[in-house]
């Protein structure tokens, strides 16, 4: 019996919808439903109105690998096809992480999604305090700046230094865990300060230093504000005529190079891959495209010619230690996935700018801080690229030459975390190999000396 002949026995993949794969990301509607159910349940538990700040609502991926793999084709675990009676529905679960603002607690929930909101139910709920802190949300970056700019000693200092407080820009950083003072009993951020005199100035060209500042963003208070010994406080770097990157039309070079001619990439007969929902097939490869707020792009169940290559593939974490022993730079030890979220900071890609050629885009679905769903259009780019010579030989006796070119499939996304842009690329090759690439661009992180 071949695979296709018995795969049709598995038409119902999940409990919520026919033909929906267990790894298909949550939709905007599912995210909103899960958020509303958790809000309602916690409100009932706490006997009144509560204020929740949602950090993430993502698909709780099936934990039973064997079940998923057997549903997927039966060749992952053995060459023996699975009998149709093995058919078992996989519940569709949403993992919800939210902060209870009124009590400074963290709630981690699992919501089992039904065919409609009336069939949704809370599968589990754990509430903890002082043990963990969820990833930072975009709204909390804004809170950090607001709290600092309303702090009387900071206002006074800016006035004394002749600085317009409205032109000070704040980049919040997680402080790490160096002493018990950094324990997750409080939700702490420390601000890195810059001065942006003109609207289009490079923010990072004029750092302001000399202060040790720590902010509790849950209580909205400055808990540390003191000078750093030996450092000049809030000294403003003079303007430099070369400090700005020039503004230019989108997707073009700031200075046109007359010797650089247009480069067009065309595939008049279309792409060689096929897409069905979130499933992709190309040159013997098959896989499913997922996305999370923490990791961004996730590929599931990667097979090459029906042989397993990976069960789950993602950029799980990216640690960026700055290595400067001086305060506050030694605090710059960013966990960009866990603290900020690669997926959460992903942005829409533009044809001809971020990706060139015949492009297929996937959208991403994320939660807002209110627990509703939102769409990032064209968050993931997929396209084919020529990959040079795969094989070549010339018969020196006859001069006859044979050449084979190779091609690769590239799946990518780009995120912005403060000053840096990170491009993440997964390259699938025709020989079953997989390559992962990370591209760093954006603006260098600066600090006052």
Image (spheres, rainbow, N blue to C red):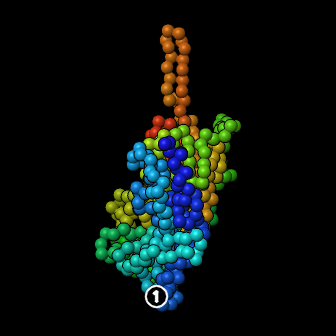
Q: As rendered, which of 352 and 6 lies closer to the eye?
A: 6
Which quadrant of the figure contains the C terminus? bottom left
Q: Which residue is mark 1?
A: 46
Q: Residues within 10 Å of mark 1 (few under 14, many from 20)?
A: few
How many numbered marks does the figure carry? 1
Task: Where is residue 214? Give x, y as percent.
Answer: 41, 75
Residue ID at (43%, 85%) = 103
Q: As rendered, which of 236 and 226 lies closer to the eye?
A: 226
Q: Is residue 439 above or below residue 236?
A: above
Mark 1 secondary-structure assignment: loop
Query: Quick check: can you spot residue 359?
Result: yes
Residue ID at (57%, 54%) = 278
Residue ID at (48%, 54%) = 84
Task: Where is residue 255? Give x, y as percent.
Answer: 64, 45
- For this orientation, the residue located farthest to the top is 397
Q: As rendered, which of 169 and 244 lies closer to the eye?
A: 169
Task: Where is residue 287? Give x, y as percent.
Answer: 51, 49
Residue 287 falls left or right of residue 359: left
- For this orientation, the residue located farthest to the bottom is 47
Q: Is residue 54 above or below residue 12?
A: below
Residue ID at (54%, 20%) = 402
- Quarter holding residue 337: bottom left
Q: Is residue 219 above or below residue 249?
A: below
Residue 334 falls left or right of residue 276: left
Task: Where is residue 210? Give x, y as percent.
Answer: 41, 70
Query: Quick check: can you spot residue 170?
Result: no
């Amino acid at each position: 019996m071949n695979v296709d002949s018995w795969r049709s026995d598995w038409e119902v993949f999940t409990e919520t919808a026919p033909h929906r794969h267990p790894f298909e990301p949550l939709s905007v509607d599912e995210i909103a439903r899960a958020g509303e159910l958790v809000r309602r349940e916690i409100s009932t538990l706490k006997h009144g109105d509560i204020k929740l700040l949602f950090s993430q609502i993502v698909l709780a991926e099936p934990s039973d690998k064997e079940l998923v793999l057997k549903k997927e084709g039966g060749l992952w675990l053995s060459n023996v096809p699975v009998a149709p009676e093995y058919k078992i529905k996989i519940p569709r679960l949403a993992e919800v992480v939210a902060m209870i603002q009124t009590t400074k607690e963290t709630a981690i929930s699992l919501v089992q999604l039904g065919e409609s909101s009336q069939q949704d139910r809370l599968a589990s709920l754990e509430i903890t305090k002082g043990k963990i802190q969820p990833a930072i949300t975009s709204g909390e970056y804004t809170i950090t700046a607001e709290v600092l700019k309303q702090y009387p000693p900071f206002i006074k200092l800016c006035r004394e230094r002749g600085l317009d407080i409205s032109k000070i820009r704040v980049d919040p950083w997680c402080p790490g865990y160096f002493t018990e003072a950094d324990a997750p009993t409080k939700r702490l951020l420390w601000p890195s300060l810059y001065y942006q005199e003109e609207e289009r100035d490079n923010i990072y060209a004029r750092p302001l230093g000399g202060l040790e500042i720590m902010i509790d963003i849950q209580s909205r208070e400055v808990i540390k504000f003191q000078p750093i010994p030996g450092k000049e406080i809030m000294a403003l770097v003079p303007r430099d005529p070369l400090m700005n990157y020039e503004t230019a039309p989108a997707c073009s070079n700031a200075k046109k190079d007359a010797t650089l001619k247009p480069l067009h990439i065309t595939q008049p007969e279309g792409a060689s891959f096929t897409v069905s929902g979130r499933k992709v097939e190309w040159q013997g490869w098959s896989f499913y495209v997922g996305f999370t707020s923490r990791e961004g792009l996730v590929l599931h169940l990667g097979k090459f010619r029906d042989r397993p290559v990976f069960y789950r593939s993602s950029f799980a974490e990216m640690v960026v230690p700055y290595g400067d022993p001086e305060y506050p730079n030694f605090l710059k030890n960013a966990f960009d996935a866990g603290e900020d979220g690669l997926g959460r900071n992903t942005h829409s890609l533009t044809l001809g700018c971020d990706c060139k050629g015949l492009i297929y885009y996937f959208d991403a679905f994320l939660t807002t801080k209110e627990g509703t769903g939102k769409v990032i259009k064209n968050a993931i780019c997929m396209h084919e690229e020529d990959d040079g010579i795969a094989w070549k030989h010339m018969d020196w006796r006859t001069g006859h030459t044979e050449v084979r070119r190779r091609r690769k499939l590239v799946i990518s996304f780009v995120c912005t975390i403060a000053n840096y842009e990170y491009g993440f690329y997964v390259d699938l090759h025709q020989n079953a190999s997989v390559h992962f690439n990370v591209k760093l661009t954006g603006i260098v992180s600066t600090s006052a000396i």
